[in-house]
Image (cartoon, rainbow, N blue to C red):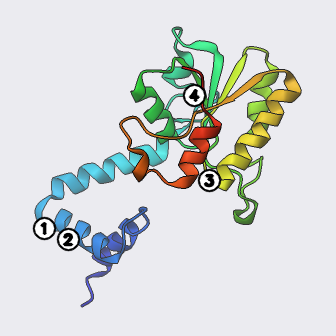
Amino acid sequence: MQFSPLVNELIEALRRLPGVGPKSAQRLALHMLQRDRDGARRLARALDGAAERVGHCADCRTLTEEPVCRLCRGSHRDRSLLCVVEWPQDLVSLENSGAYQGLYFILMGRLSPLDGIGPRELGLERLEARLDAGEVRELILATSSTVEGETTAHVIGELCRARGIQATRLAQGVPMGGELEFVDGGTLAHALQGRRPV
């Protein structure tokens, strides 16, 4: 069955969201139109406002409506530590841990030449300028453990080495509370390579 043009347009717009297929998009659209028109209007206003006013922080590249985000402006942050992550949600995860008090640089992806994502798309020239400013003493690489994430970490590690800046990598391996019998071989290999004294 075909819906009206506006309903079809809403369904197609919702399909642009990651993980939302045709059935889910249809279900979401119909729910908003049948049961939650106020919620639909609020969602429309929020999307419109965010699309118009949210940009990237001039320092770390996170999403913000300010020229420089509150984390980069924070006087309590350790400016000698810089953690490089792939996505804004990675920054949120690290912040929620409460274990890190330095600054961030968000790549908005990882190197993937086959997808046309190179150093320029990741803003590596901006990262280099930040490293050249002389404030960073240690750069923490918190990229994913995929082939692309490891390649990205390697390239950034080389940028640090060329400047005499210590580059470290987040530990990877057995999760807290994890049972060895349920951990895959690749994770165990990383855990063995990254072991530390007790």
Task: Tell me, yes or no, if residue 94 can be seen here.
Answer: yes
Q: Please, is residue 192 above or below residue 131 in the view?
A: below
* Res 36 quadrant in image: bottom left
Which residue is at a point 27% across and 74% down the rendered structure image?
A: 26
Q: x, y percentage for residue 27?
A: 23, 71
Measured in 3D between alpha carbons, the distance from the residue under mark 2 to the one under mark 1, in whole angstroms, is 6 Å
Cα distance in 3D space between marks 3 and 2:
38 Å
Q: What residue type is labelled 1?
A: Gln
Tag 3 secondary structure: loop
- The first of marks 4 and 3 along the sequence is 4
Labels 2 and 1 touching (C-beta < 8 A): yes
Report how far apart the C-alphas of labels 1 and 3 lie in the structure: 43 Å
Q: Do the residues labelled 1 and 3 touch (CB within 8 Å)?
A: no
Which image quadrant is residue 134 in?
A: top right
Label ID, residue 30: 2
Circle 4 is placed at which residue position? 67
- First along the sequence among labels 3 and 2: 2
Where residue 12 appears, x then y in whole percent? 38, 73
Disc 4 marks a residue whose amino acid type is Pro
Residue 135: image quadrant is top right
Q: In this view, does 186 lie to the left or right of 135?
A: left
Which amino acid type corresponds to the residue marked 2 in the rendered image? Leu
Label 3: how many residues lie within 10 Å, few (<14), some (14-19) or many (20+)?
Answer: few
Q: What distance separates the C-alpha of mark 4 from that of mark 2?
A: 38 Å
